[in-house]
Amino acid sequence: MSSGDHTAHVHRDDYGSRMGMWLFLFTELILFGGLFLIYAVYRFMYPTEFHVAAMELDTVFGAVNTIILLTSSLTIAMSITALQRNRKTLSLVLQFATILLAISFMVNKYFEWGAKFGYGLYPGSEMLLDKPSGEILFFGLYYTMTGLHGLHVLIGIVFIGIIMYQVWIGRVHSTNYVRLESAGLYWHLVDIIWIFLFPLFYLII
Amino acid sequence: MSNHESHENHVTGYGVYLLVWLGLLMLTGITVAVAGIDFGRITITVALLIAAIKSWLVLTIFMHLKFEDTTFKIFVFVAVITFVVFIVLLFADYLFM
Amino acid sequence: MANGTLYMPETEPNYLDYRGRFKGILGWILSTDHKRIGLLYLYSMGLFLTVGIFFGFMMRLELIAPGKVIIEPQTYNSFFTLHGIIMIFLFIIPGLPAVFGNFFLPILIGAKDVAFPRINLLSWWLFAIGGGLAITSVFLPGGPADTGWTFYVPYSIRSTTNVLPAAFAAFILGFSSILTGINFVTTIHRLRAPGMDWFKMPLFIWSLYATAWIQVLATPIIGITLLLVAVERLFGIGLFDPALGGDPVLFQHLFWIYSHPAVYIMILPAMGVISEIIPVFARRTIFGYSFIAFSSLAIAFFGSLVWAHHMFTAGMSDTGRFVFSLLTFLVAIPSAIKVFNWIATLYKGSIQLAPPMLYALGFIFLFSIGGLTGLMQGALSINIHIHDTSFIVGHFHYVMFGGTGFGIFAALHYWLPKMYGRMYNEKRAKVGFWVLITGFNLLYFPMLVMGWLGMPRRYYDYLPEFHVYHFISTIGSWILITGLLIMAVNLILGVRRGAKATDNPWGGETLEWRIQTPPTHENFHEIPVITGGPYEYKINENGQEEKKYEEVT
C-alpha cells in the first residue's frame, strides 16, 4: 500500500534500505555459491575432463564479455556520482550506457550459446552424452551457471530501466538516490559473479 | 536514529572510478596471460587470487563498502566466511574419499 | 522501564478496527500492517496445519496393523511426503517468525512497523502462493510427489509424480522466508527505540535475529538445489544424476547445508518464546541474560556446521564423518546453556502454572528428550545402527513438535489476549495441554523404542513383532488430535466471545504489555524511551512484588 496508509513511514531510512539491499545480495551470493560448491567438487573429481571440456569454450568470447561487464560497472558507478552532483542528464546517459552494455553482453552470450547448439553441444544432445561423465558435468554446470547469470543480467536490465524512468520523472534525484544505489549494488554483484565465472570456465588450461 | 550519516555525503569522483576500472582491465589481461602458463597445482589458485582482488576492488570502491560503517563490513565478512566454511567442510568429506 | 506516552486510551482505533485505504478482506490481504500480516500468517498456517495433521492421521491409521488397512502403498508414500513438506515448509519454519515475529518484533523493540512493510506483505503473498501450489500439486495429473520431503536424487529426477510443482513450491516458500529474514535483520538494526540497546532487547528478539541470519544465509542453498533438480528434470542437464556422472551424495550435502540449519530456524524462535514466558510466570529476572542471548548466535553458528550428520551412512569419507560427528556434539553446548538458564530462572521463583507456563514447561521436557536422543545419533556407531529407523522419526518429532510446536502453542496462549483483546478459558486450556502432552508421548515414545529395535522409517508394512508399538502409537495420535481440538476450540471460542482481556493479564514487563489491547494501528502513540531491562521483577521487603507500572484497563 502507499505511504498514505502508513504515517509510520514518513521518515526515510536510506541506510536501512542499503542494509536490506546488501542482505539481499548475500542471498544471491550464496545462491551462486551453491553452484560454485558443485563446481568445486566435480572439478576435484574430474580434473582432466574439465580441462578437456574447457578447451571447447572460446576465451575471446569470455574475455570480451568480461570487459563489457567491467565497463558497465564503471558506467553505473559513475551515474551515481553524476546524480549526486545533480547532473541528471549525464546520469541518465550513463545508466543508458549500462543497459546497452548489458544488452551487448547478452547478444554476445546468444552467439556463444548459439554456436555450441549449432555444433550439437547442448544438454541432452547425443554428442554430449557420448562424452565422458566429467565433460557432461562440465557442460551441465556451464549452461546452468552462465544461464542463471544471464538471467540476472536480464533482471538487472529491467531493474536499471525502472530506475532510469524514476530518475527521468524526478522521483529519484540528487538528494534521494538510494534506489539508484541499490540498482548499482545489484549490478556490481552480477559483475563480481562473472569475475569468478570467467576464469573457472574459460581459462582452465 | 543514527550516527552513520557520513556515507550520505560521500561522493566518489569519476577519476577514482576510472582508475579502478583500468586496474580491473589490467587484472583481466594478467589473468588471461598467465592462464597460458602452467603453474601446476597452483594455477587455479593464481586465477582465483586475481578474481578475488578484482572482486575486492569492485566491493570496496564501486559498491562503496569502503565508505560504509563497520556494521556493513562485518556483514560482508560474515557472508563470505559462511561460504568459505561451507567449502571447507564439504571438502572435509570429499578430500578424504 | 520505558518513558513516554505509550497510548492515549480510547482515542485511537485498534488495528482490528482500523480502516485503511481498503475495506473488508482487501483491507487484510493488502495491508502492510505487521500485525495484520502476522494474523494472515496465523490463519493460513492454521489451514496448512490442518491438512498436515490429516496426512499424519491417515498414515498412523494405516500403520495400526500390518498389511493394508485403508490406503495403498503409493498413497502412503505420497502422504508421508506431503505431511513432511507441509509441516516443515508451511508450518514450523514460518510458524514463530512469521506469525509472532511479525506481530511482536516491532512492538517489543518499540517500533511502529518493520523496516520494509511492503516486502513483508510480499513475503506473505509468496507464502500463500507457495502453499497453494504445494496443495494443488496433490490434485494435478501425475499424482502427488512421493519422494519424501527431502527430494533425494536420483529418485526425484525419475519419479513420474508431481515432483516439479512440489519442489517449485518449496523454492517459492524459501524466497518468502528469505525476505522475512532480510526484513527482521534490518528492523532490529534500524528501528529499536531510543535507549533499547542490544542488551535491553527481549530475548525473543535475539532469537529472531539469529534465526533471520540463518534464513538469509542458508535458504538460498536449498533454493538453488531444488532449482537444479527442476533443471535436471526439465532439460536433462547432467548435474546430480549418476547416469550422467553426477554424485547423488553431493545433492544430499547441499540439501542438508540448508535443511539442517533450517532445524534451528524452527527451534530458535521457540526458545526465544520460552525465554519470554519463564520470567513472567516465575516472577523473576531471567537467569543469565547474555548467555541466553549469545547462545542463540552460537546455535545459529554451530548449527550451520553439522549438516552432514544426516548422511553418515550415505558413503562419506571417514574423516568427513569424524569431523561432522565432533561438530554435532558442540551444538549441544549452547542448547544446554539455554535449558540450564531457564531452570535456574525457575529456582526460587514464584511459579504460576498458567497455560503459557504449562506449555513452556512442556517444551523444556519434550525438547530435552528430543535433544538427548539427538546427541545419541551424533555418535557415529549408534547412528549407523539407528539410521533411517523410526527412532529418527521419534527424535525429530520430539524436537520439532515437542519443541517448536509446543513453543508455538505457548506463544499462542501467551500473546492471544494481546492480539485479540479477549481471554480464553484457562481451565479448558490446561485440560487441552494435559490431553495433548499425554497423546504426544503415547504417539512418539513407541517410535523411539521400535526404532531402536530395528523398525525402518517410511515403511508401509512391518513385522508382527512391531505391532504393539504401532498400535499404541496410533492410539496416541487420536489422543493428541483430541488435545489439539480442545486447544483450537478453546482459543477460537476465546477470540470470539471470551472475556475482555486487560492490557497486561500476565503482569509482564516487556513493551507489548504497556500498550493498548489490542494494539492501535501504529502500536505506540509516541515512540517510548527505554530505560531498563526487559525482565526487571523486584520483590520488596514485605515479600510483595514491586509494581512499576500502573495497570490501565
Image (tube, coloured by chain):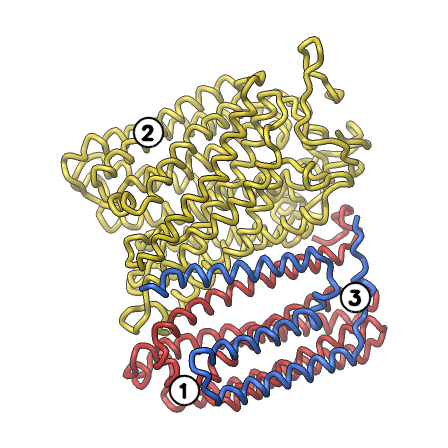
Q: Nearer the viewer, mark 2 or mark 1?
A: 1
The image quarter in which residue B18 lies: bottom right
Q: Nearer the viewer, mark 1 or mark 3?
A: 1
**Image point 56% across, 83% down: which residue?**
A106
Q: Secondary structure at mark 3?
A: loop
The label number, if any, that marks residue C172 in the structure image:
none
Q: Is residue C278 above or below residue A184?
A: above
**Image point 37% across, 40% down: which residue?**
C374
Residue located beneath label 2 in the image: C478
Same chain for the residues under marks 1 and 3 in the image = yes
Q: Chain of mark 3?
A: A
Residue located beneath label 1 in the image: A117
Q: Chain of mark 2?
A: C
Q: How many marks?
A: 3
Q: Quadrant of the N terminus of chain C?
A: top right
Task: Quote the CA–CA distance across marks 1 and 3.
Answer: 44 Å
Residue located beneath label 3 in the image: A171
Task: Quote the CA–CA distance across marks 3 and 2.
Answer: 60 Å
Which amino acid type is marked by label 2?
Trp
Q: Colour of chain B?
A: blue
Task: Say if mark 1 contacts mark 3, CB within 8 Å.
Answer: no
**Image point 65% across, 22% down: which residue?**
C507
Q: Colour of chain C?
A: yellow
Task: Say if mark 3 contacts mark 2, CB within 8 Å.
Answer: no
Q: Nearer the viewer, residue A24 or C128?
A: A24
Compare marks 1 and 3 and give the one earlier in the sequence: 1
Q: Chain of mark 1?
A: A
Chain red in the figure, letter: A
Which amino acid type is marked by label 3?
Arg
How crowded is the residue under tag 2: few (<14 C-alpha within 10 Å), some, or many (20+)?
A: some
Q: Is residue C436 above or below residue A94?
A: above
